[in-house]
Image (tube, rainbow, N blue to C red):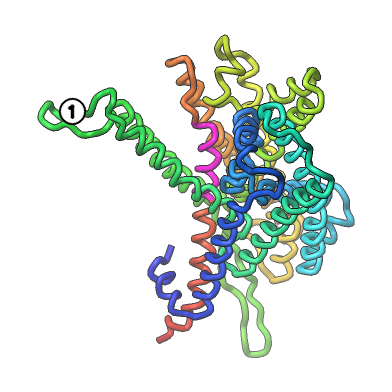
Amino acid sequence: MHFKTIFKSLKNKDMLKRILIVLSIIAAYRILAHVPVPLGEPATFKEAVDNLISQSDFGNFINLISGGGLTSFSIILVGLSPYITASIVVQLLTKAIPSLEELSQDGETGRRKINQWTRVAAVPLAIIQSITYIFILYKSVVAANTTITTDPTMMEWVIAVTAMTAGSIILMWFGELMTEQGIGNGTSMLIFASIISQLPTTLSNLGTSLFDTSEGSLSLFGWLNLPVNPTVFWIMLGFSIALLVVIYFLVKLNEAQRIITINYAKRVHGNSSYGGIKSILPIKLIAAGVIPVIFATAFLSLPALVGQFIQTVNPDATIGATLVNLFTAPSASNFSSLYPDGITAQWFVYPAIYFILVILFTYFYTSIIFNTNEIADNLQKQGAFIEGVRPGLKTSKFLAKIINRLNFFGALALGLIAMLPFITDYVFILVLGYPIGLSISGTGLLIVVTVALENLRSLDSRALMVTYDDYGK
């Protein structure tokens, strides 16, 4: 990264304007996270929301990517989940329907049409999810809070659903506005901001535990007592070291790439010659980035939401309880309730399916963003070729072979990184008899590191464009 160039580019008015627009959108997004849904008294939904988060990993995921919008029962409670789900559906249809695949290859016009269809598909999904959330939360509040004696009117229901749907659409619009600034993917930046926004609360809780000296203080060599809890101090020190090691390997994996040398044929036109130069085609080890993890989490968490809805409608239905139990991520908050007799075979179901989905989505999303046939055709049109490989179909097969090999190791690495919290919990279950609760932070850490690197790279590219003329002076 050219950090000097980035700082130098801030003198450019256009660059500064783009950054200020992105920061303003993030600020507006954080304000929306505290605007409550207009349905009754928002404080009465706190207990129901806490139950939803503890019982379903979908609640954890929504609360994570909405920046705490679920816990505050805000209008952005649904968050970006409808847009993510619509993207998955549209991209699956693009691969399944030849006419859509041709449209996706039709340059900028085709991509705009597909993006428009994705936006349209996200609206009914947002309405459905808004109705589902409100229904589940309201029924949970009624079951736990005897102070609610009247049901909301139809108009109140419509206003609440409309507000939540509008909040989701606004976030989708915010993401596109940020993407247009050319310094990173807007949707990823919103998710990044959501996770980072919860750090102050986490650090505050850790600080409270660290400076709680009711059980004694830390003694250094018998001559100095620090006013910190010794057990919490050593645990936090160990986790800090482990966190740095994990971040280091995440950065290495995210930056790893295979370099392919591209040769351009020499052409003679009159008295001038063109070509005869070499270039490179970098192929990243994990070309899909963090998208497979987000897709897998959203896709795997939906059955638990459906199970909760069924349980709310019919508490005696066994299928609802089965869906919730099978598709709820094992964590410290639900371990004692789901596994009162200790770890069972069911504990491994969610991590195993999660691992498989991460691998499948890695292959799927890479095939979308790295079309070997299109790249081979473009190289052939430009008079470029890979040494020892014939242009056209042979080049496409060569690139497909390389990307499949990289995907194999990249998908396994991404899956193992996503499994680290579960592996850590399993070790502590064997040693202590209970997990320590890292299942939520694992996905967040992976998203934060990957998105931060991608956005820094985009910002660096924009800064180089802005300051390009200065290199000639």
Nearer the observer, 110 or 280: 110
For residue 366, say whether it is visible: no
Q: Which residues are magenta?
A: 438-450
Q: Residue at x 68, y 49 (%)?
A: 37
Considering only vertical position in the picture, is 468 above or below 208?
below
Nearer the observer, 48 or 385: 48
Considering only vertical position in the picture, is 326 above or below 366?
above
Q: Residue at x 30, y 34 (%)?
A: 211
Q: Is residue 66 magenta?
A: no
For residue 144, say whether it is visible: yes
Residue underneath mark 1: 219
* Horizontal relation, residue 243 to residue 48: left or right: left
> Does the magenta stretch mainly form a helix, a strand or a loop?
helix
Picture coordinates of residue 312, whole percent (x, y): 76, 28
Considering only vertical position in the picture, is 187 above or below 143?
below
Please, what is the three-letter code of the amino acid marked with disc 1? Ser
Instruction: Rate crowding at label 1 as few (under 14), some (14 to 19) or many (20 or more) other CA atoms within 10 Å.
Output: few
